[in-house]
Image (cartoon, rainbow, N blue to C red):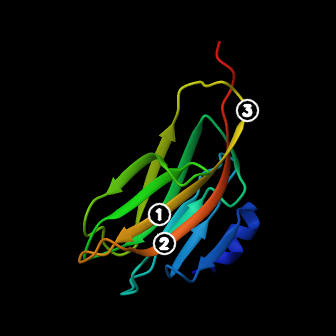
């Protein structure tokens, strides 16, 4: 047996332990691929691995995360500066033990410029709909000029 850390260091691939999900996070590698290896846990929650705070996205936002919401669904939204929802994706109910998810939000070419947006992920409470396990990540969304 060879220690996992030793192999990752030799390959020069980042490795970290994500305490919020009890998972090993490997990468991103040279192709910008991030791999997540969840350990069995009863902890509930929602974690966004990418993008990180302040990332500038051009026309699309690729969201990679993990969810463990056994009693309900999870929602991932992209919100404008005024709080209005630009785009939304719902993850299925009972997503399992920190199962990975991938969401891609894309917008058509716009007037150009950069817009400050927020990536918001949460699990609505089954009883009153209030957000649980909420994660908010500020982003910059740049739209290229129309062709």
Where does the C terminus fall, quadrant-wise?
top right
Q: Residue furthest front?
A: 82
Task: Point out the tag, 1 or 2, that comes first from the N-terminus.
Answer: 1
Q: Earlier in the sequence, mark 3 or mark 2?
A: 3
For label 2, count other residues whose C-alpha is less than 10 Å away and answer few (under 14), some (14-19) or many (20+).
some
C-alpha span from label 1 to label 2: 6 Å
Q: Is residue 3 above or below residue 32?
A: below
From the image, tell me which residue sits under label 2: 134
Residue 2 shows up from this direction: no
Depth check, mark 1 against mark 3: the one in front is 3
Q: Residue at x 51, y 36 (%)?
A: 106
> Secondary structure beneath disc 3?
loop
Given residues 84 and 13, the one toward you in this image is 84
Q: Quadrant of residue 24?
A: bottom right
What is the distance, in whole Å, between disc 3 and disc 2 at their CAs? 28 Å
Task: Specify whether 58 is left or right of 37.
Answer: right
- Residues marked 1 and 2 touching at CB (< 8 Å): yes
Q: Residues within 10 Å of mark 3 (few under 14, many from 20)?
A: few
Location of mark 3 (residue): 113
Which residue in the protein does label 1 denote? 121
Q: Position of residue 89 (x, y in %)?
A: 38, 50
Alpha-carbon distance for marks 1 and 3?
Answer: 25 Å
């Amino acid at each position: 047996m060879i220690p996992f850390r030793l192999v990752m260091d030799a390959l020069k691939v980042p490795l970290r332990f994500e305490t919020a999900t009890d998972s090993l996070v490997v990468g991103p590698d040279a192709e910008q691929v991030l791999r997540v290896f969840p350990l069995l846990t009863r902890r509930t929650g929602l974690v966004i691995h990418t993008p990180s705070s302040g990332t500038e996205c051009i026309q699309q936002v690729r969201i990679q995360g993990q969810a463990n919401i056994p009693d309900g669904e999870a929602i991932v939204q992209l919100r404008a500066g005024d709080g209005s929802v630009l785009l939304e994706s719902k993850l299925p109910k009972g997503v399992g033990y920190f199962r990975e998810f991938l969401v891609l939000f894309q917008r058509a070419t716009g007037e150009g410029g950069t817009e400050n947006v927020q990536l918001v992920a949460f699990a609505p409470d089954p009883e009153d709909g209030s957000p649980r396990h909420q994660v908010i990540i500020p982003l910059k969304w740049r739209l290229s000029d129309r062709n």
